[in-house]
Amino acid sequence: MNKALRKAVIAGNWKMNKTPSEAKALLNEIAPLVKDADCEVVACVPYVDITTAVEAVKGTNIKIGAENAHWEEKGAFTGEISTGMLKEVGVEYVVLGHSERRQYFGETDETVNKRTKAVLKAGLKPIVCVGELLWERECNITEEVIARQIKLDFFDVTAEDMKNVVIAYEPVWAIGTGKTATADQAEEVCAFIRETLAKLYSKEVADGVTIQYGGSMNDANAAELLSKEDVDGGLIGGASLVAEKFAAIVKAASV
Ligand code: PGA
């Protein structure tokens, strides 16, 4: 982390877990444990939990995020949710391009780019996920894959808008598998993302972007990952569903 240059952000990605009443209970458990955090604390929750979650975190330092958003303002898109809908219910962050959406729901860099622009236009903050598959790492093309995703996902996004962007580096092989990237592997790719942004925009813009690591980050490995210069936070799946574990990660980012 380099808190002098950018904000540290610890975000839970709850995925398809927790009903509204369970969400309320978990947030009530987390809130007192993270109240002194010296980083941004976010819980990205299923759509139906959002209203309850926003209510539950009133008066706390926790922000609520969604797990996706459509690029059109409204229309015939059965099953989708617009940025305007999310904004009205109090969402501040939106996870986009998660590898589970890319793998199971046909998400492409083109749709991630459209969603990113729509989210920024609405004044919300996207958490854009990028990451290589295991075989791509084994074939030594991690940097090519990441550079391509960054170039396509942020095509036409202005330098000004980049101030509201969070990028999550999530190696697909590390998600939900218990296989964390080593701190050096995470730093290598997060630094590469920053170099890529510097080429596309400027060093100043690149230095200001929060780049998270995600993929089996937990209470035991967070401090080492976050000790790296270019790892500015975490996108946490499994460990975000356990109040003490999530709070320990927030604490590791608060040093
Ligand atoms: P995990 O998930 O922490 O359970 O590996 C991370 C993510 O998918 O964002």
Image (spheres, rainbow, N blue to C red):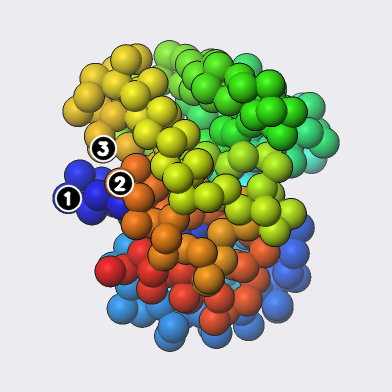
Mark 3 C-beta to ligand 1 under 8 Å: no
Depicted 232 relative to depicted 237: above or below: above
Residue at the spot of label 2: 229
Tag 3: amino acid: Gly
Give the residue drawn at x 35%, y 50%.
228
Tag 2: amino acid: Glu
Closest to the camera, between mark 3 and mark 2, is 2
Depicted 130 relative to depicted 90: above or below: above
For marks 3 and 2, the one nearer the N-term is 3
Callout 3: helix, strand or loop?
Answer: helix
- Neighbours of disc 1 within 10 Å: few (<14), some (14-19), many (20+): few
As measured in the structure, the alpha-carbon distance from the residue carrying label 1 to the one carrying label 2 is 11 Å
| Picture coordinates of residue 98, whole percent (x, y) | 65, 39
Residue at the spot of label 1: 4
| Picture coordinates of residue 141, whole percent (x, y) | 61, 20
| Picture coordinates of residue 254, whole percent (x, y) | 31, 68
Residue at the spot of label 3: 208
- Neighbours of disc 2 within 10 Å: few (<14), some (14-19), many (20+): few
Tag 1: amino acid: Ala
Q: Please count the marks in the image.
A: 3
| Picture coordinates of residue 70, whole percent (x, y) | 64, 33
Depicted 246 relative to depicted 229: above or below: below
Callout 2: helix, strand or loop?
Answer: loop
Left or right for 249, reference 46: left
As measured in the structure, the alpha-carbon distance from the residue carrying label 3 to the one carrying label 1 is 10 Å
Mark 1 C-beta to ligand 1 under 8 Å: no
For marks 1 and 2, the one nearer the N-term is 1
User: Can the viewer see residue 127 in this picture?
Assistant: no
